[in-house]
Image: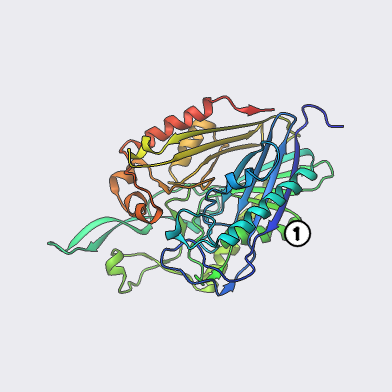
């Protein structure tokens, strides 16, 4: 019989690969169904439960999760604290019924994903065991694979002097980014390692074939881990603050469109298959090697979870509708997860660690994502992630100059809020 203080854990995963070709989400002008497949799509889940609290994390191979949390919660019993995380792959069908400019959603597929998630939660509730130990590791070796995508460039203008300087979607070689990759492994009383959680910030974009269904690098890393841990292992990817970060696929020889999108170089280039495969294997290698440096602690029993909301109008004016959701999941001595329902700029990760501690994981793309969350510097610079994305995402606000400060205040309120705890 379980002790009152004992923290139970379970993990599982389920396939959500569509059975027939349907459109993918991620690019406004890509409306055709996928023509090939580069792997399977999944939901990977973990459940932590005590007598007082049940928290379920579901990591989905999707651009965004849309309103799925409410749909799933309506079909399960009890009141679990659900935390849905999108990997942000740009090569999976849309799960967002509202942001159709980012991908034509297929209602039948969304229904299938909701059903699969409910079935997964039922499985997680049936199979629970006590945690024996939790191992954590952080690596800085992922630096060569990602880069800031906000570079100042000159662009052709219609009026004199016919050239203007602005912030473009271009490589920023000298702009610092947070390159850390963190991993957490959980072992149970039978010495099994049924789950890995990991966190890294990088847009899953620029596949060799834009019409190939794919879970991108999160899926490749998942398969690499399963070769070591076994095919039953659940691999929960917690996408970092990647709003302005993407893979480092560069070229220096300009093409005609580069005169429109900004010059001089370097420029982003779509990789060939060999280059893309090297990127996938490189990220996977950093992750698998980090497992060799895991530091294991004793079994843990304390679990706490907090959720707060901030009206988008408080950071983007009266025209902005909806809320920004903040989640804080903490397992004493093991996991310190801080999530924002947006595409936060990478710099916000430092703010997270200043408030919640250096071991905190900065996680974006949780729940119903409204769009990008730029920092004060970016708001002053302008560019796609500040203004250009708005009509595509259906966002009608205009970021206030002190948005970053307001987010800091909201995060401190999250830390100070009374948690659900065991």
At x 58%, y 71%, the residue is 21
Please tell me which residue lies in front, 365 or 195.
365
User: Looking at the rendering, which quadrant does residue 357 occupy?
Assistant: top right
The answer to whether residue 284 of the structure is visible from this angle is no
**Quadrant of the image for the C terminus?**
top right
Compared across the picture, whether 302 is left or right of 338 comes to: right
Residue 225 horizontal/vertical position (percent): 69, 57
Q: Which residue is mark 1?
A: 231
Q: Is residue 291 above or below residue 281?
A: above
- Residue at image location 69% in from the left, 43% down from the top: 76
SS for tag 1? Answer: loop
Residue 149 pos. (x, y %): 39, 56
Which residue in the rendered view is the most extreme toward the left?
160
Crowd band around label 1 with a 10 angstrom C-alpha radius: few (<14), some (14–19), many (20+)? few
- Which residue is nearer to you in this view: 299 or 73? 73
Q: Is residue 3 visible?
A: yes
x then y, percent, for residue 3: 82, 28
Which of the 4 image quarters holds residue 172? bottom left
Q: Is residue 16 above or below residue 186?
A: below
Seen at 27% across and 69% down, the residue is 259
Q: Is residue 409 left or right of residue 422?
A: left
> Which residue occupies the foreground of this view, 18 or 255?
18
Residue 58 lies, in percent from the top left, at 64, 48
Most foreground residue, 74 or 190: 74
Residue 320, quarter of picture? top left
- The answer to whether residue 334 is left or right of residue 364 is right
Of the 4 image quadrants, the one containing the N terminus is top right
Horizontal arrangement in the rendering, residue 390 relative to residue 31 (left or right): left
Identify the residue at horizontal 48%, vertical 72% (top origin): 32
Farthest right residue? 1
Above or below 135: residue 250: below
């Amino acid at each position: 019989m379980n002790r009152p203080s004992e923290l139970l854990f379970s993990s599982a995963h389920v396939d959500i690969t569509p059975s027939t070709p349907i459109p993918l989400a991620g690019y406004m002008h890509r409306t055709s169904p996928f023509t090939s497949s580069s792997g399977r799509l999944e939901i990977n889940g973990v459940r932590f439960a005590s007598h007082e609290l049940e928290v379920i994390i579901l990591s989905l191979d999707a651009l965004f999760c849309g309103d799925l949390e409410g749909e799933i919660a309506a079909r399960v019993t009890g009141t679990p604290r659900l935390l849905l995380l999108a990997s942000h792959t740009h090569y999976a069908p849309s799960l967002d019924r509202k942001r159709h400019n980012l991908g034509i959603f297929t209602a039948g597929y969304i229904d299938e994903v909701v059903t699969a998630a409910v079935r997964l939660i039922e499985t997680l509730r049936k199979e629970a065991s006590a945690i024996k130990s939790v191992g954590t590791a952080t690596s800085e070796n992922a630096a060569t694979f990602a880069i800031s995508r906000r570079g100042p460039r000159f662009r052709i203008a219609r009026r004199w002097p016919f050239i203007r300087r602005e912030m473009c979607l271009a490589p920023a070689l000298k702009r610092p980014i947070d390159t850390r990759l963190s991993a957490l492994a959980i072992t149970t009383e039978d010495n099994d390692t049924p789950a890995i959680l990991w966190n890294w910030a990088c847009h899953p974009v620029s596949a060799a074939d834009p019409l190939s269904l794919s879970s991108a690098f999160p899926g490749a890393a998942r398969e690499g881990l399963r070769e070591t841990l076994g095919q039953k292992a659940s691999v929960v990817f917690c996408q970092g603050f990647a709003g302005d970060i993407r893979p480092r696929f560069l070229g220096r020889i300009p093409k005609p469109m580069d005169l429109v999108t900004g010059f001089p170089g370097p420029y982003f280039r779509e990789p060939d298959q060999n280059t893309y495969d090297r990127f996938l294997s490189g990220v996977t290698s950093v992750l698998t090697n980090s497992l060799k440096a895991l530091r294991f602690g004793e079994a843990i029993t304390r679990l706490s979870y907090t959720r707060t909301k901030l009206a988008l109008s408080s950071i983007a004016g009266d025209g902005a509708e909806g809320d920004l959701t903040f989640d804080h999941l903490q397992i004493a001595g093991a996991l310190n997860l801080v999530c924002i329902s947006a595409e936060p700029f990478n710099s916000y990760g430092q703010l997270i660690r200043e408030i919640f501690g250096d071991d905190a994981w900065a996680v974006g793309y949780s729940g119903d994502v409204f769009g990008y969350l730029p920092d004060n510097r970016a708001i002053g610079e302008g560019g796609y992630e500040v203004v250009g994305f708005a009509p595509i995402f259906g966002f009608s606000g205009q970021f206030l100059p002190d948005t970053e400060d307001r987010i800091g205040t909201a995060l401190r309120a999250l830390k100070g809020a009374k948690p659900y705890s065991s």
